[in-house]
Structures are given as C-alpha cells and as structure tokens.
Image (cartoon, rainbow, N blue to C red):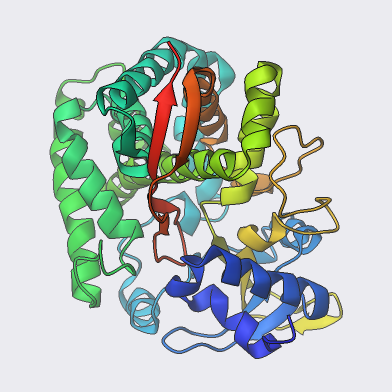
Amino acid sequence: MSEMTISEAAQVFASPQAYANDEYFHRACDLLRAEQPVVWVEAEGVYPFWAITKHADVLEIEARPGTFTNAPRPVLVPKEDDDAAAQNGNPLRTLIYMDDPDHRAYRAITAEWFLPKSMARLDGRLAELAKASVAKMKSLGGTCDFARDITMQYPLQVILAILGLPDSDYDRMLTLTQELFGQQDPEFSRGTTQEDRNAVLMDFFAYFTALTEDRRAHPTEDLASVIANARINGELLPILEVMSYYTIIATAGHDTTSSSIAGGMLELIKNPDQLARLQNDPSLMASAVDEMIRHTSPVKHFIRTAQEDYSIRGVHIRKGDSVLLSYSSANRDEDVFPDPHKFDVGRTPNKQIAFGFGVHFCLGAMLARMELKALFSVVVPRIGSIALNGTPELTQSTFVSGLKRLPVTYTLRP
C-alpha cells in the first residue's frame, strides 16, 4: 500500500481503466478505507465529489433520502453531460434520477411485477433457459467465451420475455446496452462526444416509441403493456418517462445480472475448492449467489447530492456537494466481511449491498438472485472440469461494469 498515495487511490472512482483492473482498484479502496474513508476527489473531466468507501457510511447516507437526493446528479458523468443536464434537463428520467414523491409513484407502477408471487411464474422459463445454456456449452465442444456465449444471452432473454419482446430483437438490445453502459470502453463506445452518447438514447427511444404505440393500441399481459398504459393522477406518463422506464428495465435488468454470472463463474474457477464445496452441497447455492453478487458488485456507484450540511466520520459535507457511494468498496469492508477478498460460497451472514439500501433498493434484486440460482443450479453439477483459456477482460466503465470476456475450457458430466 505504501506504493500508492491517498490522492492516487482516490482517482480510481473516476477512472474507467481502474475499474477494468480489479486488483489495482481494490488495493486503492483498501487503502482509503483504512486511512481516509471519506475522501475528496478532483479528477480530470468530471466535477469533484466526496467518495464514500465504508459499508456503514454508505448505509447511513442511503437511509437519508431527504438529506441526500438522487437529483440532480445520480451518476458520475463527464462535465459536459452535467452541464447539458443542468441547462436542458437529463435525456433520461428513470427511477435513479427521481426522488419522492415522483420516485414512490413511478416505482409503484412496476413494483407488483417484482414481488415473489409474480416472479414465481418465471421459474419454468428460467429453468428452460438454464438448460439451454448448458446445451450450448455442450455444443461448443469444451471451449467458449463464457461471458459472451452464455452470460450475456441468458439474462437478456429473460428480460425480453418479461417485456414481451421477440428473441429476434436480442442483438439490437445487446448492442444498445453495451453502447450505453460501455460508452467509456473503446470497444463498445459509439463515440466520445455528448452527441454520440445521446444518439444511443435516441435509438432506444425510437425502438420503444413504436413499442408504446403498439401496447397502447393492443395491450397484452406483459410488462411493456403495464408501462405503456400506466397512469399517475389519472394521466398517462409523459413520453420521456415511458421511454426512460423501458430503457432502464431493458438494460440494467440484464447487464448487471450477466456481470454477476460471469464474475461468479470466474471466482469458481479461481477457487476450485469452493466449486467442489458447492457441487457437494447444493444447499449452499443461495449463499453462493449472494457471494457472487458481493464480489462483482456490478453497479459500481451512485451519486447523491447533499441538501443540507452534514458530517460523517468527522468530515463536513456542505450543502450542494456530491457524494459517490462506492458499493464495490463497501462490499469489501473488513469491518463487515471477515477476510473480505476471499470468495466463500457459504458466507453467512452476508450483508452485501450491491442492490443498494432503503427506498432506492433495486426493484430487480429478487429476479437477479433467481436468475443466478437457476443457472448455476444447472451448470455447477454438470462441470467436470473448468479452467481459464485466456485472459479475462473487464469493461472499462465507472458505473455498470463486469467481465466482457471470460475464455474457458471445460468438460461436462453427463
């Protein structure tokens, strides 16, 4: 740790390249949690912010949504995007941009869809898709890119089914999602300007405008119809909110899950004793899934804005200051997780906060856990052997990121 300064460590939260270097990123966070857990960050290209690295501090801020609001800056973006949003409003207005009372009203539109009684109807589809994933692994003859060939497809097919969209739209949704969340990664970015980033949103909006018109004219039983025909105070949602709702469901609903699946498989490969443990005791699957989610923490951060002066760990945060909640760091906090960098499929308790906390707790948390459990419950028993067949690669992104490549070689049991 002596090789890295506090200032250097703090820069990781604004560096897409740092998020793609897992060892370096967590070494920086270890240092900050130990020596300066609430740190002021000034980095090139973004407006400054406080980075919050400890589990307890993230919970403290999340528990005060009136003091620390989502608006106007819920995610770290380039200065030019912040300036444009301040002048013209955000091009997206999803739940992550909202505070009460709007947040409560808009969240209620789809909340019932993500309750246990509603999610139960997906069990059959999840089992079917999990078996299809194993069949695909078998057809690939013992080598594949697990991230691209399996994990990017499986959760996206689930989301398409929930929204009532055809499988033929798979490639389009995958490309747009990668362009949206991977805009800082040269491999996925459509371009480097604000106009390029807005063009991706416009493509989403064009697709979902046609979907809205169809579902309003011919409503069905899918989630797309619920969103298209939702009303607040008797009025249909403004078109921006409809488009934004579709976009966040279609993107965050699969990209984060695929990151957890790929990251979970990588940990099983790196820790063959834990793979064997899970194979020998399938009752550990639920705790294993939470450990996969803790280790990957696909949503790296959210930003809140202080609406009044506030002190935390003796640090004075002024009204108007931005605070970045680092879920990646909080989920490796030594005060909460013994031996935090160890992957332990039986970790109990596991107070991971990858889904957030409080009123903004992720709507899709139960679905994500169901998807991981369904897939690994089918895949893990079939693994005879599995090893890396190249170098895993992480997406360069400060917001949502995970493995974009996981080349593996494997044998499957009958």
Please indicate whether residue 105 sits to the left or right of residue 245 in the image. Answer: right
Q: Nearer the viewer, residue 145 or 338?
A: 145
Residue at the (37%, 43%) spot, across then down = 147
Above or below 52: residue 276: above
Residue at the (72%, 61%) spot, across then down = 58
Please indicate whether residue 46 sits to the left or right of residue 148 in the image. Answer: right
Residue at the (76%, 43%) spot, across then down = 351
Tell me which corner region of the image, top left, top right, bottom left or bottom right, holds residue 1. bottom right
User: How many numbered dots are placed on residues in this image?
Assistant: 0
Q: Nearer the viewer, residue 85 or 139?
A: 139
Above or below 148: residue 366: above
Residue 197 placement (x, y as % from top left): 24, 67
Quadrant occupied by the C terminus: top left
Q: Nearer the viewer, residue 56 or 223?
A: 56
Please indicate whether residue 331 sits to the left or right of residue 373 in the image. Answer: right
Q: Residue 356: in sight, yes or no? A: yes
Please indicate whether residue 61 sits to the left or right of residue 171 in the image. Answer: right
Q: Residue 234: in sight, yes or no? A: no
Residue at the (42%, 59%) spot, across then down = 394
Residue 87 placement (x, y as % from top left): 34, 79
Residue 144 placement (x, y as % from top left): 31, 38
Residue 274 placement (x, y as % from top left): 67, 34
Tell me which corner region of the image, top left, top right, bottom left or bottom right, holds residue 80. bottom left
